[in-house]
């Protein structure tokens, strides 16, 4: 009986994991060149977010503590958003996307810090950055970064 219950629970857990790791908002791009092109057209900076969606606890907490807030939603309208995920589970993103993301890691996140927010201009020049998250619900420094570079 418990195996039958377990069989019914597996899809529930799988869908919850997929939802947790996905980029919820269609505003997030996953291609650097597309983000830069859009930034040039809209005369905006790019907010690059480096995450390890399936292994980085602070990255997971930021989803709830920062990305789901009204403040972030409002401030993020001033940016082109670029989501760079480097998961350990290779089934979460395509092989092509993983290669692209690792190239960006080498180019924009040489120290391989997660989570990392990097603000770049439409030419790809770094303007500002903020690394880490203490997982205590205090997102003031993240919001200040967004406010300062819009």
Image: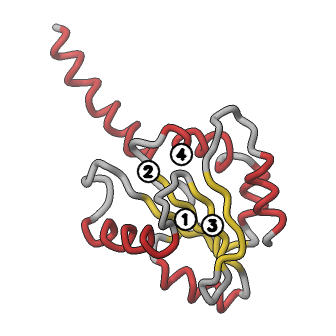
Measured Cα–Cα span from mark 2 to mark 3: 15 Å
Pick whichever of labels 2 and 3 is earlier in the sequence: 2
- Residue at the extreme front: 111
Q: Which residue is mark 3?
A: 118
User: Which quadrant of the view contains residue 62?
Assistant: top right
Q: Which mark is residue 59?
A: 4
The answer to whether mark 4 and mark 1 are in CB contact below 8 A is no
Measured Cα–Cα span from mark 2 to mark 1: 19 Å
Q: Which residue is mark 2?
A: 52
* Dot in front, 3 or 4: 3
The answer to whether mark 4 and mark 2 are in CB contact below 8 A is yes
Task: List x then y, in percent, for residue 8.
Answer: 25, 24
- Label 4 SS: helix
- Label 3 SS: strand
Measured Cα–Cα span from mark 1 to mark 3: 19 Å
Nearer to us in this view, 20 or 51: 51
């Amino acid at each position: 009986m418990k195996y039958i219950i377990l069989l019914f629970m597996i899809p529930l857990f799988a869908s919850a994991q997929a939802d947790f790791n996905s980029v919820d908002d269609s505003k997030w791009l996953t291609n650097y060149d597309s983000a830069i092109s859009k930034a040039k057209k809209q005369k905006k900076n790019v907010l690059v977010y480096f995450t390890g969606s399936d292994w980085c606890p602070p990255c997971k907490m930021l989803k709830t503590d920062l990305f789901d807030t009204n403040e972030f939603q409002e401030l993020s309208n001033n940016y082109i958003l670029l989501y760079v995920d480097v998961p350990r589970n290779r089934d979460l993103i395509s092989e092509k996307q993983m290669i692209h993301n690792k190239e960006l890691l080498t180019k924009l996140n040489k120290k391989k810090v997660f989570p990392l927010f990097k603000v770049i201009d439409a030419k790809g020049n770094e303007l500002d950055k903020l690394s880490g998250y203490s997982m205590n619900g205090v997102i003031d420094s993240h919001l200040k970064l967004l406010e300062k570079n819009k």
